Amino acid sequence: MALALGGVVTTTGCASMGPGAPPSGTLEKIKATKTIALGYRDSSVPFSYAGPTKEPMGYSVDLCLRVVEDLRSELKVPDLRPRWVPVSVETRVRALVDGTIDLECGASIGPNPHRRQEPPCCTIQTGCYPDRSRAMPFADVGGVKLFYEETGQGAPLIFVHEFAGDYQSWHLQVRFFARRYRTIAYNARGYPPSDVPDKPEAYSQDRAADDILGVLDHLKISKAHICGLSMGGYAVLHFGLRHPGRALSLTVAGAGYGSMPGERERFRRDVDETARRFDTEGMVGVASFYTKGPTRVQFMDKDPKGWQEFYDQFTAQSAKGHALTMRGVQMSRPSIFELEAAMGRLEVPTLIMTGDEDDPCLEPGIFMKRKIRSSGLVVIPKAGHTINLEDPELFNRALLDFLTAVDAGRWPLRNPQSQTGSAIMPAKPK
């Protein structure tokens, strides 16, 4: 990786210096404040632009954050934090000169950033402009562009991320399942580089479910395995209820927040407060409590480095998009318990997964198991909410066993004789 910073180029190549010298002492300031101000070219998206057309051609939060990782090591500041600062093409040079930002980040990325085949290009003054021939993949869903990433070959397997994640949240699953499946992970609306529509009515539970359909249609996929966590799990469940003929299987993980009777109003109050704080405090302010909640501490305890990656990716996202999503989706979606009749009609093979310490999702998970005749339930021990990252081996193994059974035609509906109302007596002969 190359880094041109404060007049100093560190480590690997791809740095260039533009006209005008950055202020002296940049590295010292970063070390002293333990913060690096990263300039990006939009009010919500860390984009780099291809020349004077300003056409967005390159993006990757994880590549930008690799710069921060390198600086943590080189400056020996392990708790260095990124702070995103919007700049325009016209103001970026002045922002560098006067110290408003420390670094202008862009990324030259190929079709699969997770493989890290391309070094990120992060430079003072000039930025790095990607090859225009490498346009990023987007699915146009009713005029909203959704970024997606494809890896592997085989039956299609779609991953739908949680509220506190994005497509990168599935990297441990993509690396595992791409050996057998055509994996597709995408960013929901409101999550750059996907579009962030301004209108609140552009965000709802139904739209989230139909965005999955839009990705399938864009890729000309007739049927796919669909896997989602939390907000993504809700979207997968609603997709199955709305479009069952388009799903080979459904995996609904960590779904149920705000569903418990008697807790709905408190949930809505908490959602409203959190959305307000996205508006007033931004991603870093909300991250100070959201990433450390009662169902996230398990991840912190088990895998501090993995949790730190989760935190960094969360803080690099769009506060505007998160506030709109929280008000349009979480605030308004129905409780799992309100879907009883529709779930009783669902016959698509379904896997329900939850952590045993993810209290808001445990009872909704059991309820889904009882109502969806085609479902199985996996409870991961000593686990919180972010189970695909917190316990990736258990998650991947359970999901692989499920997909293998479905692909083999060996995931039957529940035998009705297993539900007689008695713990001992069989069904009475008709």
Image: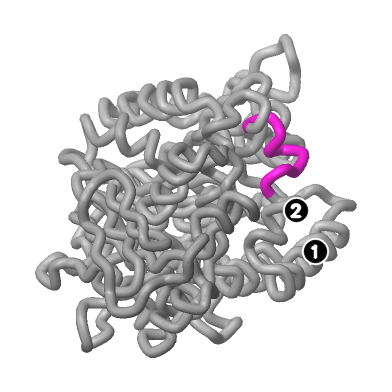
> Depth check: 200 or 57 in front?
57
Q: Classify mark 2: residues with Cα within 10 Å, few (<14), some (14-19) or many (20+).
A: many
Q: Which residue is drawn at 23% across and 60% down?
A: 108
Q: Can residue 231 be seen in this view?
A: no
> Depth check: 419 or 28 in front?
28
Quarter of the figure with residue 300: top right
Quarter of the figure with residue 192: bottom left
SS for dot 1: helix
Q: Which mark is residue 268?
A: 1
Q: Is residue 94 left or right of residue 353?
A: left
Percent x, y of residue 164 = 58, 53
Percent x, y of residue 403 = 34, 30
Mark 2 vs 1, N-terminal side = 2
How many angstroms separate mark 2 from mark 1 (CA)? Answer: 8 Å
SS for dot 2: loop
Question: What's the residue type where badge 2 is placed?
Answer: Gly
**Residue 293 included in the magenta stretch of the image:** yes
Above or below, 55 relative to 233: below
The answer to whether the residue labelled 2 contacts the one labelled 1, judged by CB atoms less than 8 Å apart, is yes
